[in-house]
Image: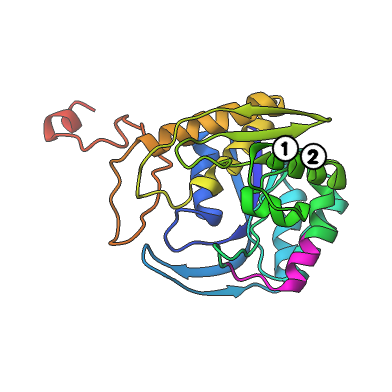
Amino acid sequence: MNVVLTIGGSDTLCASGIQGDIKTIMRNGAYAVCAVASLVSKNTKEYKESVAVTPEFLASQIDAVFEDIKVDAVKVGMVTSAELISTIAAKLRQYKPANIVVDPVIPTKQRLVPLDEAAVKALEKDLLPLADVITPDRREAAMLAGIEIESESDLIDACKIISAKYNAIVISKAGLDVQAANDLLFRDNYYKWFWGKSVTNPNNRGAGNSISAALAANLAKGYEPDKAFKRAKDYVTAMLDDQTLELGSGNGPVNQSFGLEDDFIRVLSDEEISRV
């Protein structure tokens, strides 16, 4: 089985971060291993706090994986300090894995995350140059490119700038139209739109995180980037279509394990159990 290493923060809600990635990677047919950069306390209603691990311990986790296991892809999510980002970059340079996917979680006016200016600079200077694929949302793409994005042509320009700057494939998630879910892939001076429907599901925590993890899983399995992303997008669309999971009183998690209906999932009757 192909292996994906996910690096990022934990999540008490298990919607995003390490736990969400593990569920998504396994659901997409690869085996997940992890290195935890921070411990995050949150629920469906609020973010409480985050406690980072030491750079030394993060390095130890990454070493433990690479020294023993062949890694087919790496997905890096939210990392909260410049020191930790630099540690990850150093280890990726050391082990040189294929298929590095970086989901650049950057603070914006609409999206407050616990990264300071030094961490953002380390992300841009140390980590993004190592990425094979970068998956910003529209606001993150605007920040990384240094331009305003108000049209589809602006988004194409932004992705072109980011791709040239970091010599990477860039996939901007969610586009501009709130009535649709159109994603843009830019590579080698050409772009491709992946058109999709917008799914109304209030329980959508972890959706953006999941598409990057699913992408990494499909790259690990040997799919070319275009096909890998199409498979990841189809998975997330189907996941959002499933509205059976209702947890908490706020914005709940997506159900990364939708559609599993075998005997390990179902509640079996006494008669069914007796026949086993």
Q: Secondary structure at mark 1?
A: helix
Residue 76, image x, y percentages:
68, 52
Q: Would you say the residues marked 1 and 2 are in contact, meaning their CB atoms lie under 8 Å apart?
A: yes
The residue at 69%/60% (across/down) is 61
The structure residue drawn at horizontal position 61% and vertical position 63%, both measured from the top left corner, is 108
* Label 1 crowd (10 A; few <14 / some 14-19 / many >=20): many
Residue at which label 1 appears:
156
Question: x, y percentage for residue 31?
Answer: 58, 39
Which SS class for mark 2? Answer: helix
Give the vertical position of 200 relative to 109 (above or below): above
Label 2, on which residue?
160
Q: Identify which amino acid the numbered label 1 is placed on.
A: Ile
Chain part drawn in magenta = 113-123
Q: Residue at x 25, y 35 (%)?
A: 266
Residue type at mark 2: give it: Lys
Indicate left or right for 140 with 241 as reference.
right
